[in-house]
Image (cartoon, rainbow, N blue to C red):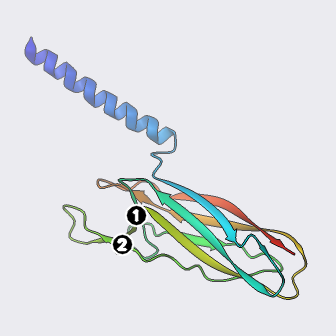
Amino acid sequence: MRQHFLRFNLVLVIFAAATTMAFAQMMGGPKFATTSVHISPAAAKPGSSVKLVLAIDIAAGYHINSVKPHDPDLIATDVSVSSVPGLNIGTPVYPIAKTLKEAGSSTPLSVYIGQANIIVPIAVPASTKPGKYLVPVTLTYQGCDSNSCFPPKTENLTASLLVK
């Protein structure tokens, strides 16, 4: 009788874990990062330059792959900024990655942990007309914990710049 009870409890625990994981997948998976984007300063004059700042806040216990992961099977963090007439979009500058050695893995990982800020310089040519400019940004990244990596995420964000 005791053996049946233990088996039933084991099945119940496995079922609960599987149900929780399935529900998390249906809800978009675990929330391993939050993102935001802004331009600093938020207003500029023609002939000046600003910085687009894409902030990724990575939850404790998670990491995201860097722009150059050591393993080619991992999805790199990638930022693309759409061209905007009147603005000159520069090349993204990624933060310095941290090296993470996971138990059981012979290859260390190149990752971002905690907060990662990606900076994109933007030049405002002297010929730029005053007005509000919306700058579309696409971020793709892959979050992982110490056991596995999750499907890659792509987020579309928009930053605003006021040219005076």
Q: Residue at x 46, y 42 (%)?
A: 25
Residue 80: give x, y in percent of width and height: 62, 72
Q: Residue at x 43, y 71 (%)?
A: 66
Q: Is residue 11 left or right of residue 120?
A: left
Residue 75 visible here:
yes
Q: Is residue 79 left or right of residue 114?
A: right
From the viewer's side, name the closer residue of 69 and 124. 124
To which residue does mark 1 refer? 113
Q: Is residue 115 left or right of residue 43?
A: left
To which residue does mark 2 refer? 98
Question: What's the amino acid at mark 2?
Answer: Lys
From the viewer's side, name the closer residue of 44 and 106. 44
Residue 47: give x, y in percent of width and height: 81, 88
Question: What's the amino acid at mark 1?
Answer: Ile
Marks 1 and 2 close (CB-CB < 8 Å): yes
Cα distance between the residues tagged 1 and 2: 7 Å
